[in-house]
Amino acid sequence: EVFDQLKTKKTSFGSTLLDVIQSGVENLDSGVGIYAPDAESYTVFADLFDPIIEDYHGGFKKTDKHPPKDFGDVDTLGNLDPASEFIVSTRVRCGRSLDGYPFNPCLTEAQYKEMEEKVSSTLSGLEGELKGTFYPLTGMSKEVQQK
């Protein structure tokens, strides 16, 4: 029944039901077996995704709301290492998606390169304490990878 409802649907990125279930078809031991190839898939293939997501999250329904974030009072957050004894460095690793692009399963090489350029140029504009070093995955040395 769900298959018949979804078998001909496509997202604006061209993602199909096959793209959604491909991992589960190829990996029968996969825990969930489906992945959204783009953000729109959650809507287009909602009849498949919604019950699985609800079950996976222990009854958290589509109509439920995530509680508001609370990082505490950031004005009272002091220096975590005032004597500079313990914190040598920090890093931020990002693993999210960019608006206007499909998710990893359906990205083309050209889209990867385009996204890398956007991220690199955006990050290179940061100044002061936000400034850092961007390391693209392509061409990264083993030494840098192990840091």
Image (spheres, grey):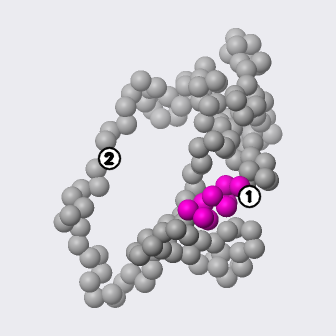
Image quadrant in which the C terminus is located: bottom right
Is residue 129 in the magenta section? no
Image quadrant in which the N terminus is located: top right
Total labels: the figure holds 2
In this picture, is 134 found above or below 57?
below
Percent from the top left, x then y, of residue 26?
A: 80, 39
Q: Say if residue 48 shows up in the picture.
A: no
Q: Is residue 6 left or right of residue 74?
A: right
Mark drawn on residue 4: none
Foreground of the two, 65 or 23: 65
Q: Is residue 145 left or right of residue 16?
A: left
In this picture, is 139 found above or below 84?
above
Q: Which residue is mark 1?
A: 113
- Residue type, numbered disc 1: Lys
Secondary element type, mark 1: helix
Percent from the top left, x then y, of residue 103?
A: 67, 44
Residue 46 picture quarter? top right
Foreground of the two, 108 or 147: 108
Q: Main secondary structure of the magenta part?
A: helix
Percent from the top left, x then y, of residue 6?
A: 71, 18
Residue 35 picture quarter? top right
Q: Which numbered mark, 2 or 1, is in the foreground of this view?
A: 1
Q: Residue at x 56, y 75 (%)?
A: 133
Residue at the far left in the pictured view: 76
Q: Which residue is mark 2?
A: 69
Q: Which residues are magenta?
A: 114-122
- Residue type, numbered disc 2: Lys
